[in-house]
Amino acid sequence: MKYAPAIGRKGRGRRWRRVGARPRIWAHRGASALVTENTLEAFAAAARAGADGVELDTMACQSGELVVFHDDDLERLAGRPERIAELSWTTLRALELAGGHRIPLLADVLDACRDVEINVELKSTGPGRAGGLPAAAAKLIRDARAGDRVLVSSFDPWALVQLHGAAPELTTALLFHAGLPLPARRGWMGPWVGASALHPEHVLCSAAAVAGWRKAGYAVNVWTVDDPARLRELAAWGVDGVFANDPAAAALALRG
C-alpha cells in the first residue's frame, strides 16, 4: 500500500516532549487574542511574546496556492460570503481582514517564522477529503528546509497518511475533540496513521489519560487553553505543550 504509515513512529514523539519545568507554549493561530489570527503580524507578536511555537491552519485556494486561514469562508474575518476554495490567490491577496491585515501564504509564514517551531494544521472538509493538500504542504516544508522545526497535524487521519506518503521524514500529530466517537476521542487511531504526537481537546484530558498517552510514546499537546488554573493543572499532569491564544499570559500563568 503506497501510503501505509510506518508502525513505530511514536519514537519521534521524544523530539516534541517538554523541555524544562513547563510545557511548550504554542501560540494558537499566532497571538490571536491580540492580533488578527493566522496573519504574519500575529505570528510576529507571538514570537515577541516568547512563544515556543506558533500554530496555523492551511488550505488550498482555487488557484492551488496554500494559504494560511482557518475558516472555509471569509464571513467572520472579512465580512464576505465567499469560500476560500472558490477564490484565486490574486483575489485573496488583495482582501483586507479585520484589523487591516492580509491573508498570507504558507510559504511566507515558513520563511518568516524561522526562530520558532511551527504546527501546521492541514484543513480538510472531512475524512479523506484533503485532496492534494498534504503533498503540497510537504513540498513547501521541504523547500523551506523546515522539517526539523515543523509538526504537521490534522483532524483528518487520512490526510496524515497522505502526508506520510509524500514526506515520511516529517512528524505528524493527530487532532481530536470531544464530539468524536469513543475510539477517535481516545486517540486510538494514532498508531495507524503514523502519528508521533496527540493533540486532544483539553476537556478530554485527565491525569490518567495524559500519563497513558505519554507512556505509549506520544508527545501530548492540548488545545485550546487560556484559563490560568487549567493551564497549571494540565502542566502538573505532564502535558508537553499547550495551545493558547495569548502566549504571554499563558507563560505568566505557568510561572505562577
Image: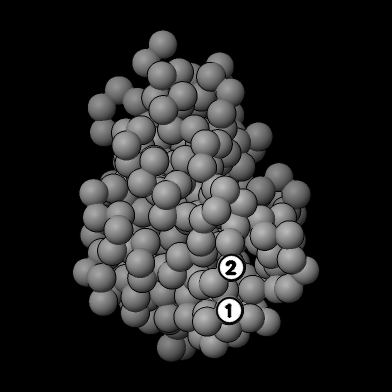
Disc 1 to disc 2, how far (Cα)? 7 Å
Colouring of the image = one colour
Residue nearest the observer in this picture, 138 or 156: 138
Relative image position of residue 194 (x, y in whole percent): 43, 65
Mark 2 belongs to which amino acid? Leu
Pointer 1 residue: 91
**Does 151 sit above or below residue 252?**
below
Relative image position of residue 11 (x, y in whole percent): 30, 54
Pointer 2 residue: 95
Relative image position of residue 219 (x, y in whole percent): 39, 45
**Does 216 sit above or below residue 76?**
above
Mark 1 belongs to which amino acid? Thr
The reply, left or right, for residue 213 in relation to residue 98 is: left
**Does 58 sit above or below residue 1?**
above
Residue 195 in sight from this viewpoint: no
Q: Name the residue located 58 percent from the left edge and 68 percent from the top edge.
A: 95
**Does 139 sit above or below residue 13?**
below
Q: Name the residue located 32 percent from the left edge and 37 percent from the top edge.
A: 48
Disc 1 and disc 2 in contact, CB within 8 angstroms: yes
Please tell me whether mark 2 sits on a helix, a strand or a loop. Answer: loop
> Could you tell me how many numbered marks the image carries?
2
Q: Residues within 10 Å of mark 1 (few under 14, many from 20)?
A: few
Q: Name the residue located 69 percent from the left edge and 64 percent from the top edge.
A: 74
Relative image position of residue 142 (x, y in whole percent): 27, 74
Residue 27 in sight from this viewpoint: yes
Please tell me whether mark 1 sits on a helix, a strand or a loop. Answer: helix
Q: Based on the displayed image, in which of its 4 quarters is residue 223 positioned?
A: top right
Look at the image and tell me in which quarter the C terminus lies. Answer: top left
